[in-house]
Amino acid sequence: MTRRSGDQEAETAPQDVTAPRDVTAPRDVTAPRDVTAPRDVIDSREVTDWWATAVSRIRPGEILLRGYPVEQLIGQMSFAETIWLMLRGELPTRTQGRLLEAALVAAVDHGPQAPSIAAARMAATCGVGLNNAVATGVNLLGDVHGGAGQQCMRVLAELERAVAEGADVDDAAKDLVAEYRAAGSHIPGFGHRFHPYDPRRTPLLDLVGAAVADGAAPGWALRAGTALERALAEGRSRPVPMNIDGATAIVYSELGFPPELGRGLFVLSRSVGILSHAWEEKSGGARIKGPIPRRLLPSYEGPAPRDLIRPEGEKGGENGEGEEGTGRADGA
């Protein structure tokens, strides 16, 4: 640090906030301050520890990701495996990396009927940057649109706790379904407003089943999820099959991710589809596209067209004069 003299040095000297202070002693804020008195010096470790991290170390000519030089990861690790490394701190097994990648691929897109993608496409026609369009779509992913996977992971964990306490998994699933139905709620991760049968379900569950058979996954989430599917189908002419949120909830639960990270991984996956649609729309050159074609107008349910007729004011305006006086009865 460059040494300075006089008042300037005293004013800019760093402060040691780690030194013990008498916090009970009142300070006379009205008394003149001696700006020439040197302040305590702050410990440099307090500064460098402010954003202490175990995720990465960045120095001139060096980039370590969880301790691994990035040049060793490039070309050797897949993107999904690198995501695992960054989130979990260690390298995944081949099976873990494959399962994570499968879940990320499965949820990557669901077309412009998904509000997040439609919003990103509309934003892209409004002259904003591509990053703004993607952010518009991603910011629509919340509890209602995009949160069912996280919610399903919690339901699966609830079933697992019941089983750990001695309950049969099918009985526990039936009880849980009954509770949700009595409350008028639906179980997240099951049924789909568009697909009678979600084509992404079976490939993901088959991969989880193979991992369980090989001892690479514990299997509890798969058992809980399929038990819920059976309970939901009982007594119905049409089943309520598992959707992508339920299937990825099983994958992420089997891989040991907490529910909140399950949502984060879904957002990471779906952002690829959002980016693709925003780029396609932006590249098309259309300007200011709304939610429906311009030739169509939203249905109107308000009053019929009517003329504006101001009600006449009472006699005796602001000046105390009536209609025939110089004052206007309406006060205008």
Image (cartoon, rainbow, N blue to C red):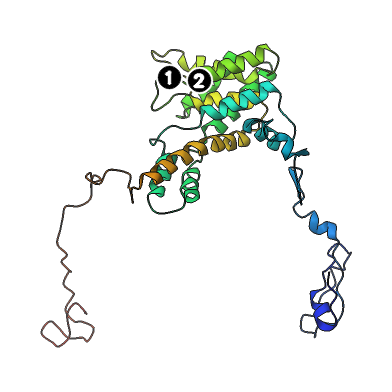
Give the residue type at disc 1. Answer: Tyr
Residue 289 point in image, percent of width and height: 33, 47
Question: In the rendered image, which quarter contains the N terminus?
Answer: bottom right
* Nearest to the observer: residue 97 or residue 144: 97
Q: Tell me if 129 is positioned left or right of 85 in this view.
A: left
Residue 101 point in image, percent of width and height: 60, 27
* Nearest to the observer: residue 285 or residue 129: 285
Question: In the rendered image, which quarter contains the C terminus?
Answer: bottom left
Q: Tell me the residue that label 2 is attached to.
A: 201
Res 69 label:
none
Residue 219 point in image, percent of width and height: 65, 17
- Residue 157 visible in the snapshot: no
- Residue 87 visible in the snapshot: yes
Q: Are marks 2 and 1 in contact (CB under 8 Å)?
A: yes
Residue at image point 44% right, 32% down: 110
**Mark 2 falls on what kind of element?**
helix
- Image quadrant in which you'd find residue 154: top right
Residue 107 point in image, percent of width and height: 51, 30
What is the tally of numbered marks visible in this picture?
Answer: 2
Q: Tell me the residue that label 1 is attached to.
A: 197
**Mark 1 falls on what kind of element?**
loop
Give the residue type at disc 2. Answer: Arg
